[in-house]
Image: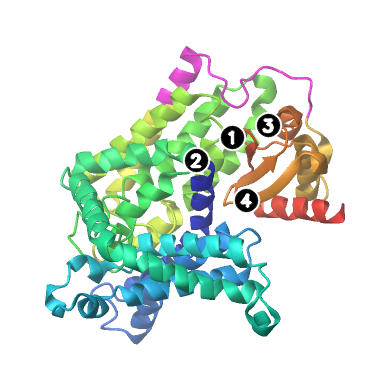
């Protein structure tokens, strides 16, 4: 089950990655016309509406992205089936359709059906479409129906499946929706404390990849909070909308880079050069883009107490920002790029104070991390026991990604042991026959931030934002053999 949920989290990264485009378009549009929100400038209106076309249709993107990501061979017909699944359920369970099905006036239809087009339904549609693809994409029908065999059969079977799902949701969706709304309202009614609780669990769930499920409740329109879309469309309450985003900026732009500096300063002298390269790259990624996994995975398993501390500090940061109503938002993650883009959003409230908060958090992160590392002698990067394995110079010479991929693949056991290779934004996700045949020292000799064993046959290699290039090189190796 855990493995399946991790695959789902990975699949969600494809549609989520589209958000920066919306953020850039809407951010520039609001920068041009911060008062009229497009009403005073055709150019601003064009950009804002273009960005809104992405934000407003995230549920469709989720349906397509999840169907594609969860299908066994990432085929386009799976993505098409995801779209078909979403269109079937949202049409059958629209307010007007439900009124006809139940034989009641439209105004008496449960309000839940007015919100049927949520990211939750998008994800569900994608999952069912992927199941249908994996089951029917290779089915051969009798000659008279052969035109509909194989991949052409998938959208048809998906439609049939979604009719059955729609029938179930006709009775279940009002209950599910009410539960999600109650959960969201329960947290939102806690105000700053609720934001802090959310921030804490957001970080705590990252190691198992389930933070996306939590994020969807607060960031998207699953429970009516829809913090990201409301912020960028400047709808809501100034100083409140954005409270589930703002507190991440001080952590990602200042806190984690300061933690990286602390880990560099506490590394062994003989390993400072290697650690410096890792921490500099990870710290810069965190500051500019808000991509924190390369840095977090460098210590979350080697020093769990340190990662727990990080989760607590993240919760505190969100609580503080929410308490003082300092708000800013992001389209992708809480880095400098999104921070700058959000400055001109009308509903942003005293966003520059997040920089002041960030500087304070940088000091806290640095000294607290340094104290904990030295006090408990934690094995953060550069402090682990010396090994006989020495990183080869070839990894950084010539085609470094090809060399890195070859070494990682060799460390995994090669063709004899590797059964599946995939990747998300920062990690290689692999399936192996025998975990005992994996040479972790050889893999780590390439300079990767870390390795995460997530199951009996599942292993993740944390590469960083260049993971796609490494994954492509591994695919070439497997194809050549």
- What residue does disc 4 label? 423
Q: CA distance from mark 4 to mark 1?
A: 16 Å
Q: Marks 1 and 2: CB-CB under 8 Å?
A: yes
Q: Earlier in the sequence, mark 4 or mark 1?
A: 4
Image point (44%, 18%), residue name: 371
Determine crowd level at label 2: few under 14, some 14-19, many 20+ residues with C-alpha closer than 10 A: few
> Residue 230 bears which disc, if any?
none
Q: Which mark is residue 2?
A: 2
Figure label count: 4
Q: Secondary structure at mark 1?
A: loop
Q: Earlier in the sequence, mark 1 or mark 3?
A: 3
x, y (%) of residue 433?
Answer: 72, 37
Give the distance between the C-alpha atoms of the residues marked 4 and 2, in whole angstroms: 17 Å
Q: Earlier in the sequence, mark 2 or mark 3?
A: 2
Left or right placement of residue 464 versus residue 60 in this view = right
Work out how far the residue at label 3 is from the one at label 4, CA to CA, in angstroms: 25 Å
């Amino acid at each position: 089950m855990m493995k399946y949920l991790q695959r789902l989290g990975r699949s969600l990264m494809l549609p989520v990655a589209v958000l920066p485009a919306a953020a850039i378009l809407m951010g520039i549009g609001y920068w041009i016309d911060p008062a009229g929100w497009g009403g005073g400038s055709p150019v601003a209106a064009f950009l804002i509406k273009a960005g809104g076309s992405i934000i407003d249709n995230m549920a469709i993107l989720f349906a397509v992205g999840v169907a594609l990501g969860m299908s066994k061979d990432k085929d386009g017909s799976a993505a098409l089936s995801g779209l078909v699944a979403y269109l079937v359920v949202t049409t059958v369970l629209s307010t007007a359709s439900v009124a006809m099905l139940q034989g009641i006036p439209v105004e008496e239809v449960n309000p839940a059906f007015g919100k049927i087009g949520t990211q939750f339904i998008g994800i569900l549609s994608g999952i069912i479409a992927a199941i249908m693809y994996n089951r029917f994409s290779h089915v051969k029908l009798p000659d008279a129906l052969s035109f509909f065999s194989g991949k052409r059969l998938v959208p048809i079977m998906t439609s049939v499946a979604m009719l059955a799902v729609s029938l179930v949701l006709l009775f279940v969706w009002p209950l599910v929706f009410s539960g999600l709304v109650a959960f969201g309202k329960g947290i939102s009614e806690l105000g700053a404390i609720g934001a802090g609780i959310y921030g804490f669990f957001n970080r705590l769930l990252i190691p198992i990849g389930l933070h996306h499920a939590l994020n969807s409740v607060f960031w998207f329109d699953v429970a009516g909070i829809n913090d990201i879309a409301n912020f960028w469309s400047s709808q809501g309450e100034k100083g409140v909308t954005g409270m589930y985003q703002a507190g991440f900026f001080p952590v990602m732009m200042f806190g984690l880079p300061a933690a990286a500096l602390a880990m560099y300063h506490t590394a062994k002298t003989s390993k400072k050069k290697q650690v410096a390269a890792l921490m500099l790259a990870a710290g810069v990624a965190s500051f500019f883009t808000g991509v924190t996994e390369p840095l977090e995975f460098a210590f979350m398993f080697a020093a769990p107490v340190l990662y727990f501390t990080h989760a607590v500090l993240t919760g505190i940061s969100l609580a503080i920002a929410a308490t003082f109503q300092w708000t800013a938002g992001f389209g992708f993650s809480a880095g400098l790029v999104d921070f700058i883009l959000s400055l001109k959003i009308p509903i942003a409230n005293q966003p520059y104070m997040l920089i002041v908060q960030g500087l304070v958090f940088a000091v806290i992160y640095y000294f607290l991390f340094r104290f904990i590392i030295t006090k408990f002698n934690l094995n953060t990067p550069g402090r682990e026991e010396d090994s006989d394995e020495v990183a080869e110079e070839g990894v950084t010479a010539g085609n470094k990604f090809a060399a890195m991929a070859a070494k990682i693949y060799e460390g995994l056991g090669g063709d004899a042991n590797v059964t599946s290779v995939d990747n998300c934004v920062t990690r290689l996700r692999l399936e192996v026959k025998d975990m005992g045949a994996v040479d972790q020292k050889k893999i780590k000799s390439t300079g990767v931030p870390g390795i995460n064993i997530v199951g009996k046959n599942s292993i993740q290699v944390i590469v960083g934002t260049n993971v796609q290039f490494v994954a492509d090189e591994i695919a070439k190796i497997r194809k050549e053999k």
